[in-house]
Image (cartoon, grey):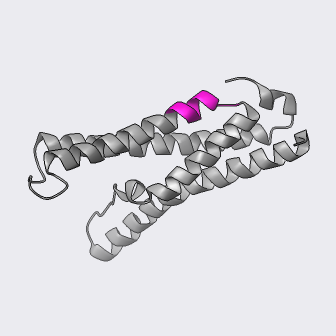
């Protein structure tokens, strides 16, 4: 693959991955605003990023590939993706093992708090990676292409 093709492919991966990460985040806020207005109460589905995990996962894969191709933010996207997967998976496993997922345990107490904390950590990591995706796109479209290849 020649350098021009590699550059174009990297930009496509970065843009698509960033859009795939931001779509569920924006959808979560849009539905919260509309639902809150219609329901006349504050409604916010913080579980939406976990529910739309396939979209988030595809975005993460594309951003990891883009960062590997341009050698920028590789460690951030790699470890961030691993951390997001660990947070979500550990929350789900803990909910299943404790009986919270099956309904055998009431939705309160320390177990519920741990599961919610894991999901909140996952959400924060996804938002951070989406912001990092914007920074990657800015670097890829910078005027000086020499700076794009700087190791981070």
Q: Which residue is rendered at x = 36% and y = 39% of the image?
A: 87
What is the total number of numbered labels drawn onto the structure image? 0
Left or right for 145, reference 109? right
Question: Is residue 19 in view from this perspective?
Answer: yes
Quadrant in the picture for the C terminus: top right
Image x and y of residue 142, in percent: 81, 38
Q: Position of residue 37 (x, y in %)?
A: 34, 72
Residue 105 lies in the magenta-colored region: no
Q: Nearer the viewer, residue 86 or 110?
A: 86
Q: What residue is rendered at 14% in x and 50% in y?
A: 99
Q: What is the residue that sits farthest to the top in this orientation?
A: 151
Residue 120 visible in the snapshot: no
Q: Is residue 103 above or below residue 114?
A: below
Would residue 55 appear left or right of 18 to someone viewing this image? left
Image-quadrant location for residue 28 = bottom left
Q: Quadrant of residue 29?
A: bottom left
Secondary structure character of the magenta stretch overall: helix
Residue 128 against residue 51 in the figure, above or below: above
Which percent across, then down, holds residue 10?
76, 45
Q: Is residue 74 magenta?
A: yes
Tell me which segment is drawn in magenta: 72-79
66 vs 23: above or below: above
Q: Residue at x 54, y 41 (%)?
A: 129
Give the quadrant of the N terminus.
top right
Residue positioned 89% across, 39% down in the render: 3
Q: Nearer the viewer, residue 2 or 109?
A: 2
């Amino acid at each position: 693959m020649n350098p021009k093709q590699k550059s174009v492919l990297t930009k496509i991966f970065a843009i698509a991955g960033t859009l795939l990460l931001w779509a569920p985040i924006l959808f979560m806020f849009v539905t919260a605003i509309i639902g809150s207005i219609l329901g006349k109460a504050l409604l916010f589905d913080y579980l939406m990023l976990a529910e739309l995990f396939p979209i988030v996962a595809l975005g993460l894969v594309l951003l990891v590939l883009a960062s590997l191709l341009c050698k920028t933010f590789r460690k951030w996207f790699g470890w961030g993706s691993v951390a997001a997967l660990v947070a979500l998976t550990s929350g789900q496993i803990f909910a299943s093992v404790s009986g919270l997922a099956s309904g055998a345990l009431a939705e309160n107490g320390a177990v519920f708090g741990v599961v919610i904390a894991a999901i909140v950590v996952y959400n924060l990591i996804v938002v951070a990676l989406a912001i990092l995706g914007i920074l990657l796109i800015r670097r890829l479209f910078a005027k000086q292409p020499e700076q794009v290849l700087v190791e981070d």
